[in-house]
Image (cartoon, helix red, strand yellow):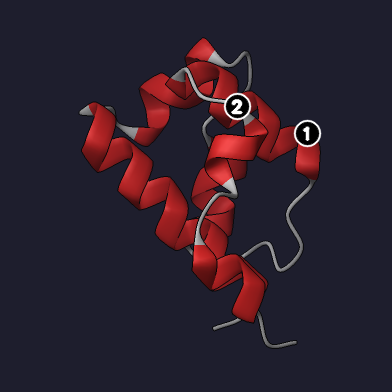
Amino acid sequence: MNLNDAIVKRINEICSEKNLNICDASLKGGMSPSAIYDLIKGRTKCSKVITIKRFCEGAGITLKEFFDRDYFNDIEE
């Protein structure tokens, strides 16, 4: 799994766990949902940490919680 795939997987997990949609989490984090949608659709190949941080803020979690998955340790690039 590459890094973008792992990030998309985690975003989807969080939305499912928190019963959120991407748009709501993005807006609550103070950003346009298009940044996350571009990542999910593969239009963005390198996500910015600030984008993930803002998503996390909107979802009510920390960056540590976001990246606290074993599959982030097995990233292939």
Q: Which residue ends up furthest to the bottom in the rendered image?
A: 76
Screen quadrant of the C terminus: bottom right
Residue 74 image position (x, y, % from top left): 61, 80
* Residue at numbered disc 1: 50
Give whichever of 39, 68 is nearer the camera: 68
Residue 3 image position (x, y, % from top left): 65, 71
Task: Give the left or right position of residue 28, taking residue 76 as reference.
Answer: left
| Residue 68 vertical position relative to residue 77 in the rendered view, above or below | above
Q: Residue at x 68, y 30 (%)?
A: 53
* Residue at numbered disc 2: 62
Task: Give the left or right position of residue 70, taking residue 18 as reference.
Answer: right
SS for tag 1? helix
Q: Is residue 29 visible?
A: yes
Residue 62 image position (x, y, % from top left): 60, 27
Q: Rate crowding at label 1 as few (under 14), some (14 to 19) or many (20 or more) other CA atoms within 10 Å.
A: few
Q: Is residue 32 visible?
A: no
Q: Residue at x 78, y 34 (%)?
A: 50
Q: Rate crowding at label 2 as few (under 14), some (14 to 19) or many (20 or more) other CA atoms within 10 Å.
A: some
Screen quadrant of the N terminus: bottom right
SS for tag 2? loop
Q: Residue at x 50, y 18 (%)?
A: 58
Q: Amino acid at mark 2?
A: Thr
